[in-house]
């Protein structure tokens, strides 16, 4: 495990012209400044939602996973494979590598397990194939589930500032800043900006870094946004990584808008982000698993489909998977040419954030 960490560190590349933004107290901030709002706004939301009469709705549909298909990752040139486990959790497989992104297999999340799962994970944790690394977008409980990480016991790639948490659990951790890339086998993983915040308790707000991931291999380029509001960074990610084959973007946790739009997207904004990225296939996530906000669990897919139709996009370009469903992603010749002609945004220098 230690040798693997050292080998990974030697393959670290960063953007030498980028300075990770922080405030005067050393807390991380978004590219466009601090996230507004705080505990008082949270209390206002909790007061307003009492007796609001919003129906819970139905959880995301679930299918049996194809265990034979996901038992091994595709080899070089065989494309990529994305399996939705639920919420923001995916098994991503390409070019001989299997990655878990934001894995949450627990039955409940949050302090004391206050939020219960509405649909079981798409596959049982013990039926996972060998996992080469786990990618964690940020430290919120619905994305960083410590019991799951302890059971998986794979190298964790996550934002800066999580040393104490992972050391306590004896997990191997590779800290990442925005626009930093690491190699996992034949795949390059780059941590990219999102518009969100972090914190798992009182007093630790924005002490750890949040973000999304671009996953690049010879067979495909994939993007997972983590949690994010809509922001201009999507266009910049698309500029740095032309030819994204599939973009996993959140479509839930947006109501009430006055509070949630600072840190989450609604379905219409998610499709605009997809267009900004210049990606080929939209893959919905962050809906139908945990009821965290006020919209019904099953409302987001209907709004996604209505917006897709309004834009005149074919149904196969916008995918809303069932929990447990696997999507095969194959790069088009045009995307292959774009990827081959792309200059790496991070290859000019190596180092770490200070």
Image: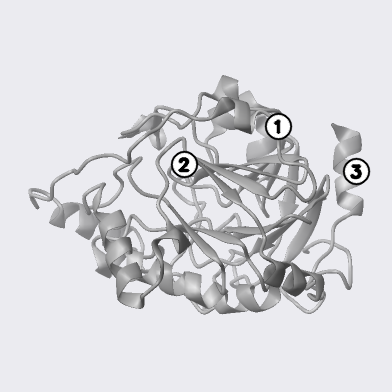
Residue 6's label in the rendered image is 3
Q: Are marks 3 and 1 in contact (CB under 8 Å)?
A: no
- Where disc 3 sits, the SS reads helix
Q: Secondary structure at mark 2?
A: loop
For the residue pair 190 and 42, the one nearer the viewer reads as: 190
Residue 340 falls in image quadrant: bottom right
> Quick one: SS at disc 1?
loop
**Image position of 163 (left or right of 301):** right
Compare marks 2 and 3 and give the one earlier in the sequence: 3
- Residue 242: x and y in percent read 67, 74
- Few, some or many C-alpha atoms within 10 Å of disc 3 (few <14, some 14-19, many ≥20)? few
Which residue is farthest top? 126
- Compared with 226, 173 (above or below) is above
The residue singled out by tag 1 in the image is 72
Across and down, in percent, residue 86 comes to: 44, 40
> Residue 113's quadrant in the figure?
top left
Could you tell me how far apart the alpha carbons at marks 2 and 3 are, in whole angstroms? Answer: 29 Å
Question: Which of the 4 image quarters holds residue 115?
Answer: top left
Q: Nearer the viewer, residue 300 or 262?
A: 300
Per the image, the residue denoted by label 2 is: 141
Give the quadrant of the N terminus: top right
């Amino acid at each position: 495990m230690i040798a693997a960490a050292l080998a990974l560190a030697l393959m670290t590349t960063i953007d030498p012209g980028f300075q990770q933004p922080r405030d005067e107290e050393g807390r991380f901030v978004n590219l466009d400044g601090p996230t507004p709002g705080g505990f008082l706004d949270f209390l206002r939301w909790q007061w307003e939602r009492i007796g609001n009469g919003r129906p819970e709705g139905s959880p995301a549909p679930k299918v049996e996973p194809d265990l034979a298909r996901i038992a091994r990752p595709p080899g070089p040139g065989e494309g990529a494979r994305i399996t939705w486990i639920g919420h923001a959790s995916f098994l991503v497989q390409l070019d001989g590598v299997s990655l878990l992104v934001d894995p949450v297999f627990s039955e409940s999340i949050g302090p004391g397990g206050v939020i219960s799962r509405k649909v079981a994970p798409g596959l049982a944790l013990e039926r996972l194939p060998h996992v080469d690394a786990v990618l964690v977008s940020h430290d919120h409980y619905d994305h960083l589930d410590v019991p799951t990480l302890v059971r998986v016991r794979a190298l964790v790639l996550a934002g800066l500032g999580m040393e104490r948490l992972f050391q306590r659990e004896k997990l191997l951790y590779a800290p990442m800043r925005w626009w930093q890339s690491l190699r996992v086998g034949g795949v390059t993983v780059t941590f990219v900006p999102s518009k969100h915040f972090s914190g798992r308790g009182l007093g630790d707000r924005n002490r750890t870094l949040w973000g999304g991931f671009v996953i690049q291999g010879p067979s495909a380029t994939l993007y997972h946004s983590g949690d994010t509001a809509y922001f201009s960074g999507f266009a910049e990610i698309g500029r740095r990584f032309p030819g994204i084959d599939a973009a996993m973007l959140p479509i839930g946790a947006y109501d009430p808008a006055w509070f949630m739009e600072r840190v989450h997207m609604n379905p219409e904004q998610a499709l605009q982000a997809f267009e900004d990225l210049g990606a080929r296939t939209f893959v919905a996530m962050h809906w139908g698993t945990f009821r965290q906000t006020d919209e019904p669990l099953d409302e987001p897919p209907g709004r996604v489909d209505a917006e897709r139709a309004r834009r005149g996009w074919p149904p196969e370009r916008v995918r809303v998977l069932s929990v447990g469903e696997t999507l095969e992603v194959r790069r088009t010749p045009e995307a292959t040419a774009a990827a081959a002609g792309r200059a790496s945004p991070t290859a000019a220098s190596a180092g770490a954030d200070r």
